[in-house]
Amino acid sequence: MIRVQREDFDPGAELAALTAGDHSVGGVVSFVGLVRDMAAGQPIRAMTLEHYPGMTEKKLAEIETEARKRWPIEASLIVHRYGRLEPGARIVLVIVASSHRQAAFEACAFLVDWLKTQAPFWKEEETEAGTHWVEAKSEDDDAAARWRKRPNEAAE
Amino acid sequence: MKLLYFAWLKTRTGRAEEELSPPDGVATVGALVDWLKTRGPGYQAAFAEMRAIRAAVNQEYVGLDHPVRPGDEVAFFPPMTGG
């Protein structure tokens, strides 16, 4: 399931709702991304997340579909916020439920790494000096690249 | 053709979206960028460094050689920074 919203979310309530009544689930892994108060050594007052309505939902759904092809997933949820967020605020929630913990851990890490580089979101930070658009980090590309299938695996 | 600009491309072009009819010779994303740059200094500033720009046609990521047609939705933006 995919949700893109301005409002905050309750991780515990989302987790409980996702797995309610499904007793095939043996493990649930969740990730919550928060707004930090520092970036590149500078204090951050807030950040504004812009996105591409329509394409965002489409890309997140594609990423989720890819995860379900790779791992045996019973249930999954991605919630991503947009708009102005202050330090400490929740930005993103990824939950993966599976029969076994290893699939849940791996699929959750995959989803977080991939959505950072594939979902059309952009962050603008507010500092004392003014506002600026955050540049993409090469380590995010590296994190996503480790999930790229090698050619000999693609045929499997 | 519907054009969309995000993040600093929106700031530099001064608009989030617009409806334009490029001339017939504009058949690829790259040709569209070249034509947009003739539309004023804001566009020139926005598209000055193509290495820092990504494009999508009809909500799929594409390269500069990808075709564009009347009625397409074409978006320009910097590399994504979500999550």
Image (cartoon, grey):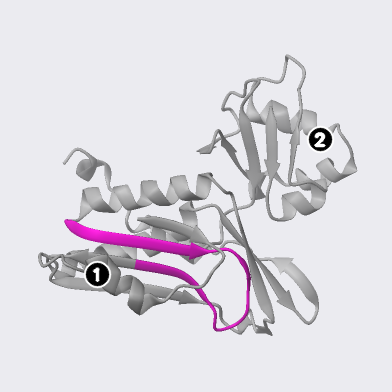
- The answer to whether residue A37 of the structure is visible from this angle is yes
Residue type at tag 1: Phe
> Label 1: which residue?
A105
Q: Is residue B59 left or right of residue B72?
A: left
Above/below status of A32 relative to A99: below
| Contact (Cβ within 8 Å) of mark 2 with mark 1 | no
Determine the residue positioned at 72% across, 75% down: A126
Q: How many marks?
A: 2
Magenta range is: A72-94
In the rendered structure, find residue A73 and report the number of the disc placed on it. none
Determine the residue positioned at 73% across, 55% down: B8
> Label 2: which residue?
B37
**Closer to the observer: label 2 or label 1?**
1
Towards the viewer: B69 or A17? A17
Confirm whether the magenta stretch covers residue A51.
no
The quadrant of the rendering that contains the C terminus of chain A is top left
Q: Position of residue A150 (x, y in %)?
A: 27, 47
Determine the residue positioned at 19% across, 64% down: A103
Q: Tell me the subunit letter for badge 1.
A: A
Towards the viewer: A89 or A110? A89
Determine the residue positioned at 37% across, 46% down: A62
Q: Position of residue A26 (x, y in %)?
A: 12, 71
